[in-house]
Amino acid sequence: MSPAHRRFLLLEQGVGAAIFNFALNAGIAWLLFHHLDTVPIRGQQSIAGDTIATSLILPFLTCLIVTPTVRRRVRHGGIAPLDRRDAAAMPLAWLPGRTWLRALVFAGLGALAFAPVTIVVLDALGVAAQSLRQFILFKASFAALAALVVTPVISVAALADEVTPAVPGGAGRQVAHGA
């Protein structure tokens, strides 16, 4: 992997995604929970429920947005593609080529990787509820960390997809592996 790839994945796809998701999810937390003084760990509107939903939705939407965006940048020469044999890309070669199927896979992986661990840690810390302010900070931080992890992985997979370069004056054709 080239230094340009590392910089792209770390800064734009990692740090940039974390900052964006921190702000976005702080706003979402306030919109969904502003009527509560405290947010319980369990229940209909709860920390656990929101954590599970965020663990599913964040990777799903991220994949739907990032995959075509990265493919487009590769197609138009904005960043070089990764060789599918690159050490970073090889473990992701099994992913479906179709973006929406890939998004479903990442949603499932996100739910399995992020939600159970987070809820177990909150339970172990004895968190029964959080003030609205604490919850907004928690949700924003959780989403930022999840985005920092998942967005570069999704981007690596998209960088390794087979993409036909754009032809000047014409629309490039995209061919994703496994499609």
Image (spheres, grey):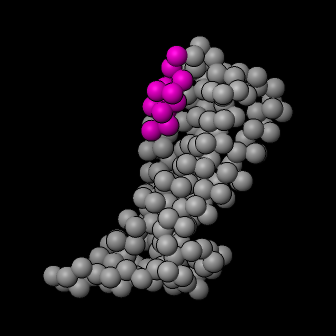
Give the residue at x 67% y 58%.
109
Residue lying at 56% horizontally and 21% vertically, measured from the top left: 133
Report the front residue among 53 and 85: 53
In the picture, measured across the screen, residue 174 lies left or right of residue 114, that is left
What percent of the width, then of the height, locates residue 106? 60, 60
Question: Nearest the camera: 141 or 161?
Answer: 161
Left-right relation of 28 to 107: left
**97 drawn magenta:** no
Q: Picture coordinates of residue 165 (x, y %)?
A: 32, 84
In the image, farthest residue toward the left: 169
| 6 over 89 or under it: above or below | above
The secondary structure that dominates the magenta segment is helix
* Number of numbered markers: 0
Q: Is residue 79 visible?
A: no
**On screen, 16 above or below 162?**
above
Is 136 on the left or on the right of 108, as rendered? left
Magenta range is 24-35
Residue 120 visible, this angle: yes
Reply yes or no: does residue 29 show up in magenta.
yes
Q: Position of residue 158 (x, y in %)?
A: 48, 72
Q: Residue furthest right?
A: 124
Residue in the image at 61% along x and 42% along y: 53
Q: Is residue 14 above or below residue 124?
A: below
Asked whether 56 or 136 is in front, the reply is: 56
- The quadrant holding residue 85 is bottom right
- Identified at 38% across, 65% down, the residue is 69
Q: Is residue 178 above or below residue 18?
A: below
Q: Position of residue 64 (x, y in %)?
A: 46, 60
- Extreme-top residue of the structure: 37
